[in-house]
Image (cartoon, helix red, strand yellow):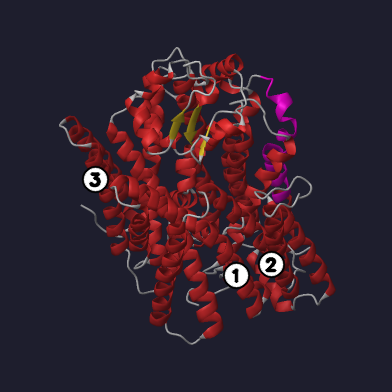
Amino acid sequence: MIKGNFIDNLPKVYGIYTGGFLAFIIIMSIAEQMGMTAKTIGICFVAFTVAIYAIIGYLSRTAQADAYYVAGRQVPTVFNGMATAADWMSGASFVAMAGGIYFKGYGYMALLVGWTGGYVLVASLLAPYLRKFGCYTVPDFIGTRYGGNLSRFMAVVVLTVASFTYVTAQINATGTIASVALDIPFQYAVYVGLISILLCSMLGGMRGVTWTQVAQYIVLIIAYLLPVFWISNKMGAGFFPHFMLADEVSRIAELEAQFGFVKNSAENLKEVPKGLAGITKAHSAVNATPWAFISLALAMMMGTASLPHVMMRYFTTPSVKAARKSVGWSLFFIFLLYSSAPMLATLSKLSLIDPSLPTGIIGKSIAEVQSIDWYQNWNQANLMFVSDFNGNGTLELNEFFMGGKAVVLATPEIAGLPYVISGLVAAGGMAAAMSTADGLILAIANAISHDVYYKIIDPKAETAKRLVVARVLLVVIGFAGATIAALEIQGILGSVIWAFDFAMSGLFFPLVLGVWWKRANKEGAIAGMFLGLVSGAAYLVWVRTGGSGFLGITQLTFGIFGSAVSLVAMVVVSLMTQAPNAATQKMVDEVRVPAGKSILGKQH
Amino acid sequence: MSKQEQHWEKSKGLLIMTLAIWFVFSIGIFLFGAEMNEVTGPFGYPLTYWFTCQGSLGIFVILIFWFANRQEKIDEEFGFSERGDD
């Protein structure tokens, strides 16, 4: 059926895979009709997809350094775009984004703008030049461009801090989904998630991760779009929701005006289970100051351009030209999901609050709402809550509370879609969290194995030994992440945003100036990374411990302060010390043209 | 000016243009978010709301492809593009 080179057959391979997955969904829905229980369907979806990823991971095993670190640099643009999109869209994007929009409206939308606008910076400032450089990891670029082990090591430190903050949230998300779908306690489910993650990356490194991420993208995008379109059609809101929900958006505004946002007393709010929130902000009106919006968007954009697990995806393309195009494809595939999240939030909110819809619960009697099946299910799962604060027996807008995750997880059930969709959504969330976790764990393990072990500790190590070290680190870092995730200390979204701020504090300017400012030197880069990371972290601690902050920079945007310090430190120290030598300057010149050999050889 | 310097000058020009467009749609328009939201935008959504849901996001996608094509042209003009196709 498939002849010749694997790369040439990619469209066919993934075409068959997509068809197979759709067939699986149909089989499951037939099984549901025939009486298969919801629980079994959930298990089938998660087990089936994870098994496929594991098979892909096994088939991609490799013993070569360039295949392990950069997938042999032969990933075509469109497929690298899909892999990057899966790498990028985390459990948070998949499960929590629509919920964030649902509850916070405009103020939260800054994240959508930030998480997409950052790719313009990636494409224009960094990705093609780092691809030309020919590095295996991001610290590899810093270490070679600026020279010296200390700069390399500092880059590894920043990378590890940022990526590790991020990865615990992802392992946490795989654990949450595995525990719901497989019905096992969270403490064990975290390790089930971890093993699934390691199955994809252990044997094949970047090559394995690349081909599983493409497969995961296909699952997650189907799992996100299918329910959105289905719900929209079922509600009669329009067959193509993205272009047709204007009436629904204005209807929500009308209802908001009619109900009003009644503020609950602190005493009443004590009754509400932790993590649940009510609708307190306008859906489509501008509810944040320009600076609050712009600072958050800016922090996310600069963070995007500094996160190593994204950047390293562009090391896998065959050429510089392909790296640039590939960024465009990545953003296109991300756009498909991100532009759907606000639509899902709109549909979800309207279906719950509009009294004229059969699913609307506001205005019904409390007793009636409490007797609805789906309310009971999600109340039990600790994602929904109602209480009659004013004692009039009727549910008001301010008396209804929901968890952010429920927007994605519960809306299909509320809208009356078959359970097969809920199973599909679980598989999609799992795919999203796994693919990001894989990218992150690999970024950390590769940086430590390549930059610390091979480049600093034992430069004579043989390939086989290097790859053993890389794999051991992968497992160690994975387990460390899972152990912290099992402690459940942070929420999913908070730690994701911190990761962006850490990355931009320490890495944005050292990376960008490395290409765009020839005069930048080693001392400047070290000062920039060190002071940027430390000042950013200090600001976070200060604000978290009751500090007032300044210039409206919050704990979510502390990277703006960190990166400003990093820029000043880097420029001042660079100018105070000697200019880089002629060889380094020539290297920068070569990085700036796509033609010719890469700076670092194919095997290094 | 050497060929390489000219190539870099042109690349810098393209970068500035790209970042200017990026700035307008990621930061500039949101300075006037409240005022703009009074206007009805594409498909009938409030304008600022539309930009945050689709507009800015879509413009970024187009901007990157546009940038990639322009940069390729610049590279070709100076004979700096890579051999081989992909």
Against B78, is B38 above or below? above
User: Could you tell me which secondary element the residue under label 2 belongs to?
Assistant: helix
Q: Say which of B28 and A8 sits in front.
A: B28
Per the image, the residue denoted by label 1 is: A157
Q: Say which of A281 and B75 sits in front.
A: A281
Secondary structure of the magenta portion, mostly?
helix
* Residue mark closest to the camera, 2 vs 3: 3
Crowd class of label 3 (few under 14; some 14 to 19; many from 20; radius 10 Å): some
Query: What segment carries the magenta color?
Result: B15-39
At which x and y percent is residue A464?
Answer: 38, 80
User: Could you tell me which secondary element the residue under label 3 belongs to?
Assistant: helix
**Between discs 2 and 3, the one toward the N terminus:** 3
Per the image, the residue denoted by label 3 is: A44
Per the image, the residue denoted by label 2 is: A529
Name, please, the residue furthest toward the right: A576
Against A44, is A574 above or below? below
At which x and y percent is residue A121?
Answer: 64, 51
Q: Say which of A481 and A17 sits in front.
A: A481
